[in-house]
Amino acid sequence: MYRKIERVLSPPDPSWVGNGFRTHNFFPSGYRISRMMSPFFLLDYNSKIEFNPSDKPRGVDVHPHKGFETVTIAYHGKIAHYDSAGNSGVIGKGGVQWMTAGSGLLHKEFHEEGFQRSGGLFQMVQLWVNLPAKYKSVEPRYQDIRHEDKGKVAIPGDGGTCFLIAGELNGVKGPAKTYTSMDMFDIHLKKGARFELPVKSGFNTGILVVEGNLKVNGDQKAPTDHFVFFRPDNSGDKILLEAPEDSVVLFLSGEPINEPIAQYGPFLMNTREELEEAIREFNTGKFGTLE
């Protein structure tokens, strides 16, 4: 009945991305499950950290991307996005920035200036979502998804709310436009909640415990800041989440992209030749300009 759990992953030792993001990399480098979580290639989790006020920008300066999408989810604090396709935006608590790099662009992201100057609690997730070969050269696009724009499904027994970023549940759809089938849910569980989530056949599935503690499938404990990786098979068509205390969970489930992967730094392609082409394009200015 329930999809079997492969492993519960403790948060890897943190490392800094730029000077604004202290992240636990669950995959691919933290634990090599990236192919078993396809189409999700990378998960960087910035667990809760308190930043002091600063007059200096905090974040990651201009860098290129090609062949995939970045999805940034804010839980605390504010993040500002800029790219060479002319897109920009700021997200706060509950907001999502979904950037399709596609054929290639330049990108930078920083703590929003007001938050940088005031400081405060910061917590976020960034995902890299792979694109199939036929979409790796699509035009870049940017989706700014506010918390209030997410789809909403009530959890039975007044147990909280499942907010849909992408995918569908109980006839409700999330606002994100995706190139492959996936479910990405921001789940807020009240103490005592019990929630059964369907898992589509053949989809790779995992959950990140952002807040609180969970029991998964009846007996497996999943503490705060841990990632539960489910078997990449059809061992079950649902998972059970039980919340001994108020909890927040990021649910990821997607149709795998069964294609070769070639990755170098900020480029995610299918072959070494395509990586070399991406590097040439970047070096010759084809990704545009961004100050």
Image: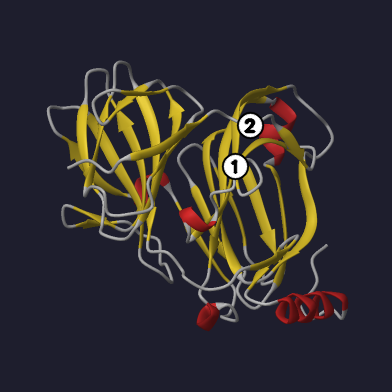
Q: Secondary structure at mark 2?
A: loop
Q: How far, Cα to Cα, is label 2 from label 1? A: 8 Å
Q: Quadrant of the N terminus?
A: top left
Residue located farthest toward the right when viewing the structure as drawn: 283
Residue at 69% x, 40% y: name it.
111
Circle 2: residue type: Pro
Q: Secondary structure at mark 1?
A: loop
Residue in view at x 74 percent, y 75 percent: 275
Badge 1 crowding class, 10 Å Cα cut-off, few under 14, some 14 to 19, many 20 or more, is few
Going from N to C along the chain, the mark reached first, 2 or 1, is 2
37 left or right, relative to 122: left
Q: How is the image coloured?
A: secondary structure
Residue at image mark 1: 31
Task: Kindly report which numbered mark, 2 or 1, lies closer to the viewer in this rendering.
Answer: 1
Give the percent coordinates (x, y) of residue 119: 69, 25
**What residue lies at 58% left-to-right and 72% top-to-bottom?**
260
